[in-house]
Amino acid sequence: MRINKDMKMAEVIHLNHHLLPVLNRFDIHLGFGERSVETVCLDNKVNVDFFLEIVNTFHDASYFPVRHLQSFKASMLIEYLQKTHAYYLEFKIPEIGKYIHQITHDENMQSTHKKLLNDFFDNYQQELTTHINKEEQRVYPYVIKLENTLNNVNASLEELKALKKYSIHEYEEDHDDVEAKLFDLKNIIIKYLPPSQNNRLLHVILHDIFELERDLNNHGHIEDLILVPIVENMEKLLSERLNKLSYNA
């Protein structure tokens, strides 16, 4: 069932409660009453079409409207992706870390297993943070500047040339597959940890890791299949403008 603008927002949550973190990324909070998706989006100054495409890609794994998503501005995508990063670093990863801290303080767990789990999670957290910081500090500012410069009809030749120092292909080639690490973390818990009295807590940890893995997979698809092609097209426009200005200079 596809989510549409005429559905009540409360119905959307009843249909798929996993969408709650996605709504939060749009600064849409609970207390919908009987308002429709369209009304809630308008009240929160959220682009309804963009919202629907994003929630439907989460709701239905087979739905990924590449062409339509590529019609949105890069800055709109980046705002969403940045809020997704904040969700990972400020909430989801600390939450999983808290549960792992609890399970590794079980007196019945061997020290070797404690070290294995703690070290692997710490390494994963560091790798994900490094990956996100690279996007936040290098990639996203470049894309925003590229979009703003192209929107400025009075941009100088020097401004356009400055942007040619960076290419989205560098980002594309060095885009770490952080989801793969989560698969290894799941296997450590599923296959290699001995039976524990805190079996229920292990199930909670696994559930959260599966949820994070799914979220990261969707996040990666938006970056690789939507944002990168949008930026490639902007870089092509940049080259065309540069050639035109250089010819007329």
Image (spheres, helix red, strand yellow):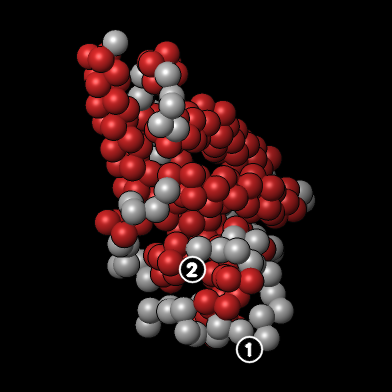
Q: Is residue 7 left or right of residue 83?
A: left
Q: Nearer the viewer, residue 136 or 14?
A: 136
Q: Position of residue 167 (x, y in %)?
A: 35, 24
Q: Residue furthest bottom?
A: 34
Classify 247 as above or below 188.
above
Give the residue type that dot 1 points to: Glu
Q: Mark 2 sits on what residue?
A: 48
Q: Can residue 189 be seen in this snapshot?
A: no
Q: How far apart in space, not on screen, are marks 2 and 1 (Cα)?
A: 17 Å
Where's residue 162, x and y in %? 43, 16
Quarter of the picture containing the C terminus is: top left
Q: Residues within 10 Å of mark 1 (few under 14, many from 20)?
A: few
The circle drawn on residue 234 is: none
Q: Secondary structure at mark 1?
A: loop
Residue corresponding to mark 1: 34
Look at the numbered discs 2 and 1 and tell me whether their residues touch, using CB distance below 8 Å: no
Q: Secondary structure under badge 2?
A: helix
Identified at 71% across, 79% down, the residue is 31
